[in-house]
């Protein structure tokens, strides 16, 4: 197999050849068809997320074909298409797992962080965290749904049922969940980097009611706001933008420090909540909704060997939609 490997945090990935991994009990060997590149991959490579497994193959928005199964797994899975997300394994016995909040498991493994991920031609996955996907769909289009879509969906659920939804940071997750909001007949208010006319036009093309820079307030108060950009200052901006009783949801795994703010921004029963990881139930809910809503993912494709260039493009924020690596 070939893989883009991180040997040292803060350094470029290296393209290497390795023997194909062997699936253990309750695992699958998957031939990667496509792996989307997530901002979390940047946080891992750049060192914002501490203590990754090294050497490490990043990548956790994986679509591929099952080539072999480990002991105890049904041979019927061979030849099927699966999606492999960020949450790659849970213990099954801690209080969180037993209370249906496996996203908060005390002993998790994360794909592309604490276990090898999908910047490769092959990957091993936990059978319980490999979601069935249709064989007749485009794997490149499916890949961003495995994190940008799932985390966007979990964030939207946390935001509640309000009609006016603000999305701060109009990247991969926002461009997916904006389409779901429009399908649900909600109004989307898209906040981009100040002056980013291209991203604002993209949001309007996807059905947003309004688009502007994050340094601007919306034309009317929002029912809720979701922050996808890893910028702590946006928490105070979003609190100013939501109505009384409104909610601000932080959808990222990493964010710069939230600045000191007056209590008056939080008063009147506004709230701030974070989203951590995902659950299998999120996938069971979201994939049918994405299909029914006819969500279209907008992607820029890079070959596997150009993984460093793909990360650089995402870091620069010059692309609309999602970045996808293809072996």
Image (cartoon, rainbow, N blue to C red):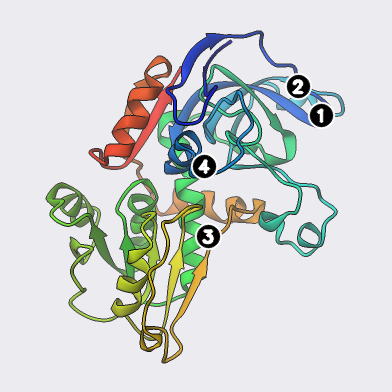
- Please indicate, yes or no, whether residue 186 appears anywhere in the rendered image: no
Q: Nearer the viewer, mark 2 or mark 1?
A: 2
Q: Give me the disc on residue 73.
A: 1
Residue on which the image places disc 3: 154
Residue at the spot 32% in from the left edge and 48% down from the top edge: 171
Tell me the element at label 3.
helix
* Upstream in sequence: badge 4 or badge 3: 4
Residue 158 visible? The answer is yes
Q: Dot 1 surroundings within 10 Å: few (below 14), some, or many (20 or more)? A: some
Q: Earlier in the sequence, mark 3 or mark 2?
A: 2
- Judge whether 73 appears above or below 86 on screen: above
Calculate the distance from the C-alpha at mark 2 to the C-alpha at mark 1. 10 Å
Q: Nearer the viewer, residue 137 or 70?
A: 70
Among the two numbered marks 2 and 1 on one chain, the one whose residue lies closer to the N terminus: 2
Q: Horizontal placement of 277 versus 220: left or right?
A: right
Report crowding for label 2: few under 14, some 14 to 19, many 20 or more residues within 10 A (C-alpha). some
Which tag is nearer the camera, tag 1 or tag 3? 3
SS of the residue under disc 4: helix
Question: Is 110 placed above or below 187 here?
Answer: above
Q: Residue 285 location, x and y as percent?
A: 57, 56
Left-right relation of 221 to 104: left
């Amino acid at each position: 197999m070939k893989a883009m490997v991180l040997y040292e945090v803060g350094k470029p990935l290296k393209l290497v050849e390795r023997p194909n991994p062997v699936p253990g009990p309750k695992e699958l060997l998957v031939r990667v068809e496509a792996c989307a590149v997530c901002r979390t991959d940047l946080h891992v490579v750049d060192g914002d997320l501490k203590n990754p497994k090294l050497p490490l193959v990043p990548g956790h928005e994986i679509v591929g074909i099952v080539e072999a199964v480990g002991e105890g797994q049904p041979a019927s899975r061979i030849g099927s298409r699966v999606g492999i997300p960020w949450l790659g394994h849970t213990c099954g016995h801690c209080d969180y797992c037993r209370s249906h909040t496996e996203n908060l498991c005390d002993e998790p493994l994360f794909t592309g962080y604490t276990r090898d991920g999908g910047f490769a031609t092959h990957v091993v996955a936990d059978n319980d965290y490999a979601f069935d996907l249709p064989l007749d769909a485009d794997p490149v289009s499916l890949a961003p749904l495995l994190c940008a879509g799932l985390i966007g969906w979990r964030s939207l659920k946390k935001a509640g049922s309000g009609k006016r939804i603000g999305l701060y940071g109009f990247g991969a997750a926002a461009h997916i969940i904006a389409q779901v909001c429009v399908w649900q007949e909600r109004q989307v208010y898209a906040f981009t980097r100040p002056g980013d006319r291209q991203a604002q036009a993209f949001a309007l093309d996807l059905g947003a009611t309004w688009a502007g820079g994050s340094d601007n307030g919306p034309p009317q108060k929002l029912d809720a706001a979701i922050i996808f950009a890893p910028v702590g200052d946006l928490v105070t901006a979003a609190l100013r933008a939501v109505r009384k009783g409104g909610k601000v949801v932080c959808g990222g795994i990493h964010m710069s420090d939230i600045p000191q703010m007056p209590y008056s921004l939080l008063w009147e029963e506004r709230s701030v909540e974070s989203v951590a990881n995902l659950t299998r139930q999120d996938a069971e809910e979201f994939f049918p909704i994405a299909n029914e809503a006819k969500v279209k993912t907008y992607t820029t494709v890079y070959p596997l060997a150009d993984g460093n260039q793909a990360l650089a493009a995402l870091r620069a924020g010059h692309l609309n939609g999602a970045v996808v690596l293809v072996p």
